[in-house]
Image: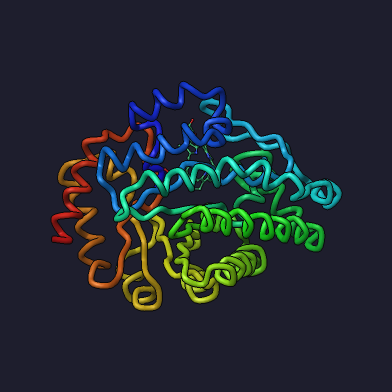
Amino acid sequence: MRQAGRYLPEYRALRARADGFLEFCLTPELAVEASLQPIRRFGLDGAILFSDILVIPHALGLGVHFEDGQGPVVEPVRDAAAAGRLSTSALAHRLRPVWETVARLKAALPPEVALIGFAGAPWTVATYMVEGGSSRDFAAVRGWAYRDPVGFAQLIDLLVEATAIHLNRQVEAGAQVLQIFESWAGALPGEEFRRWGVEPVARLIAAVKTAHPGVPVILFPRGAGTTYADWAAESGADVIGLDCGVPLEWAARTLAGRCILQGNLDPVALVAGGAALDAAAERILDRLGSKPLVFNLGHGVLPHTPSEHVDRLVALVRRWRG
Ligand code: CP3
């Protein structure tokens, strides 16, 4: 997760060549290079497309930009009238550079490295669109969903439609696995997580599986807590990404055997390095490694992570695998 990023000096050099972060994501030459950097350096098993979940609001016609040190800023959509003005008419035109990046990446990667495409889940992308960026309490998006569920459903439905197109086109361009980031699953009210979280994701996965029955789908419902089992059982995902808060014994008992698991090393353990990193990684391999496991972090690599710690982790997992 965030295997490409600011902790790599070669990424920072490449990033300096684009005006803004969105332009960076939408320039195939740069995005291909950013995707390949961690593969060259660490020899990972999977390459994730370099892009962002916020290319979808951009493709629907909203202004999106990234302020340095402040995160994303999205032109806010606060009611059904504003949602009604969004359209998929320019979607293919605006997302074509991403699909082009996937095609070029597929051609550039060694055949044994799996190419992972991705998108944000409808609820998570909606949080950025309604809040106008990152949020602490998600009051605007949850408020709209309570006040006007019919209007909010229009926005969610549009996101399902747009995201299905985006994911299907990534598969057609060469993505072999898809990952759906429900990074704000934890912001869904307990009584609403099915309606705005699981159900739209299940529709999205069904749309992908109808077009491309064989493609494996990874779902990362970060912060889902006690509803992790429901996301696993009801979404149709093949793989469930665990965040760092999921206890390994619980995951082994409740989820392993029902779906493939991915995760969940604490990115802070990767920053810490040394014996603490080894112990945290070994615990995951020990508790989850007897069933199919995609070893990964439980959230994104932090910008101040020493890259030698990633070398150490990759070597440890490879030794374990034999
Ligand atoms: O290496 C990879 O994982 C592939 C690329 C990737 C990025 N974003 C690049 C990126 C992926 C898969 C994402 C997904 C993404 N984007 C998510 C879901 C995963 C998660 O983190 O929970 C979310 C919520 C976003 C939205 C987003 N993009 C935010 C909130 C930010 C700002 C945070 C920050 O660290 O500044 C981004 C920017 C972003 N996306 C960066 C990268 C490498 C850092 C910006 C930069 O390099 O200038």
Give the colouring mode of the picture. Answer: rainbow
As rendered, which of 238 and 143 lies closer to the eye?
238
As rendered, which of 222 and 155 lies closer to the eye?
155
The number of discs equals 0
**Which quadrant holds the C terminus?**
bottom left
Percent of width and height locating residue 258:
40, 78
- Residue 117 in the image: above or below residue 13: below
Percent of width and height locating residue 279:
18, 53
Residue occupying image coordinates x 40% and y 47%: 107
Task: Give residue 133's quadrant in the image.
Answer: top right
Q: Would you say residue 3 is visible in this rendering?
A: yes
Percent of width and height locating residue 179:
48, 57
Residue occupying image coordinates x 22% and y 48%: 314
As rendered, which of 267 and 8 lies closer to the eye?
8
- Residue 13 in the image: above or below residue 214: above
Q: Is residue 278 left or right of residue 304?
A: left
As rendered, which of 58 and 101 lies closer to the eye?
101
Q: Is residue 2 left or right of residue 295?
A: right
Q: Is residue 167 left or right of residue 75?
A: left
Task: Give residue 159's quadrant in the image.
Answer: bottom right
Residue occupying image coordinates x 22% and y 39%: 309
Farthest residue, direction front: 107
Q: Would you say residue 186 is visible in this rendering?
A: no
Percent of width and height locating residue 167:
56, 56
Q: Is residue 150 left or right of residue 44?
A: right
